[in-house]
Image: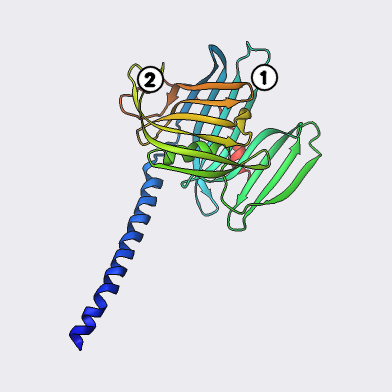
């Protein structure tokens, strides 16, 4: 009787063992995806934006600081957009500020934005436990006019900045997914396909070609600088995975964005002598909650 009981228990033990093994692999894989990316305080990446042979302007992306918010670590990231002053039909000088956690989700976003034809100083606070986005919009022409409202958030969302870091953190994986993005107080879907190794990528700022990861997809919303529609991009394969080059659609049409200088990128065979001077950071914005 005892022998029979042992025999009966063997299948269920194997099943439990198999389920535990699957759970372990799943948790390990998710942890690996989150921890592979290397955040570097002081990283600064500068990109040239070209429409054919015409230079439209410059993008500069920074990881400025880290701090605690919502009982977890977040990174203060900044994006500067400066159009070419020699081009009369494009005039854009914007700063976007996003506080992103280690899973690449935003907790606070600050910017000056044009919404429904008006310019606002916007503040979006992402309250994930209560599934709410606290919105504050101050009219830049009349600062006495302030819109305060709450928007439902049924799932975690990405802002324009966190989308970039989400891609950097997952680009080494071969998968595809549809993300929910939030921009200018509106929701939209972004399809992204992580294609894995993308072959050698040559950019003007580096003598040698770089190994790359590749992505492509389609944004079903209008985001920073009118970004929307189909896109493709290539990322370096080191732990920081900076974007090397991208082709995407903005308000003027399809443009090429290419890394041209950097600070504190520690990739293989990369010299930090090719570095930009950091933008001045306004520390007062860190206190905004």
Q: Position of residue 278 (x, y in %)?
A: 50, 25
The residue lying furthest to the left in this view is: 3
Q: Position of residue 28 (x, y in %)?
A: 34, 53
Q: Nearer the viewer, residue 78 or 247?
A: 247
Q: Secondary structure at mark 1?
A: loop
- Which of discs 1 and 2 lies nearer the camera? The answer is 2
Residue 244 in the image: above or below residue 170: above
Q: Secondary structure at mark 2?
A: loop
Separation of marks 1 and 2 at Cα, in angstroms: 30 Å
In the picture of the structure, the residue carrying the numbered disc 2 is 202
Q: Which residue is located at x 36 percent, y 36 percent?
A: 239
Q: Position of residue 178 (x, y in %)?
A: 52, 44
Any part of residue 163 in sight = yes
- From the viewer's perspective, is 17 left or right of 157? left
If you read the primary sequence from the N terminus, does the residue marked by circle 1 or circle 2 appear first?
Answer: 1
Q: Nearer the viewer, residue 216 or 258?
A: 216
Q: Within 10 Å of the Cα at label 2, are there few (<14), some (14-19), or many (20+) other Cα atoms?
A: some
Location of the N terminus by quadrant is: bottom left
Q: Position of residue 117 (x, y in %)?
A: 76, 31
- From the viewer's perspective, is 81 left or right of 9? right
Q: Within 10 Å of the Cα at label 1, are there few (<14), some (14-19), or many (20+) other Cα atoms?
A: some
Residue 284 quadrant: top right
Any part of residue 279 in sight = no
In the picture of the structure, the residue carrying the numbered disc 1 is 91
Q: Which residue is located at x 58 percent, y 54 percent?
A: 128
Residue 261 in the image: above or below residue 75: above
Q: Which residue is located at x 75 percent, y 47 percent?
A: 148
């Amino acid at each position: 009787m005892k022998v029979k009981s042992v025999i009966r228990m063997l299948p269920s033990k194997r099943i439990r063992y198999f389920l535990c093994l699957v759970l372990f692999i799943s948790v390990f894989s998710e942890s690996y995806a989150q921890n592979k990316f290397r955040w570097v305080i002081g990283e600064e990446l500068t990109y040239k934006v070209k429409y054919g042979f015409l230079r439209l302007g410059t993008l500069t992306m920074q990881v400025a600081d880290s701090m605690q918010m919502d009982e977890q670590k977040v990174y203060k990231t900044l994006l500067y957009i400066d159009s070419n002053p020699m081009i009369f039909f494009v005039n854009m000088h914007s700063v976007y500020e996003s506080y992103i956690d280690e899973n690449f989700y935003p907790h606070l976003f600050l910017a000056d934005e044009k919404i429904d034809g008006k310019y606002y100083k916007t503040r979006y606070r992402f309250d994930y436990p209560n599934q709410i986005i606290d919105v504050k919009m101050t009219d830049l022409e009349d600062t006495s006019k302030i819109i305060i409202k709450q928007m439902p958030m049924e799932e975690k969302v990405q802002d324009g900045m966190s989308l970039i870091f989400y891609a950097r953190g997952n680009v080494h994986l071969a998968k595809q997914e549809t993300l929910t993005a939030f921009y200018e107080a509106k929701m939209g879907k972004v399809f992204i396909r992580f294609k894995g190794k993308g072959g050698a990528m040559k950019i003007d700022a580096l003598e040698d070609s770089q190994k790359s990861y590749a992505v492509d997809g389609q944004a079903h919303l209008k985001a920073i600088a009118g970004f929307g529609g189909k896109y493709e991009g290539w990322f370096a394969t080191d732990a920081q995975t900076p974007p090397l080059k991208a082709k995407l659609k903005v308000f003027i049409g399809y443009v090429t964005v290419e890394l041209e200088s950097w600070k504190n990128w520690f990739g293989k065979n990369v010299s930090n002598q090719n570095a930009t001077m950091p933008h001045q950071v306004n520390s007062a914005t860190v206190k905004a909650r």
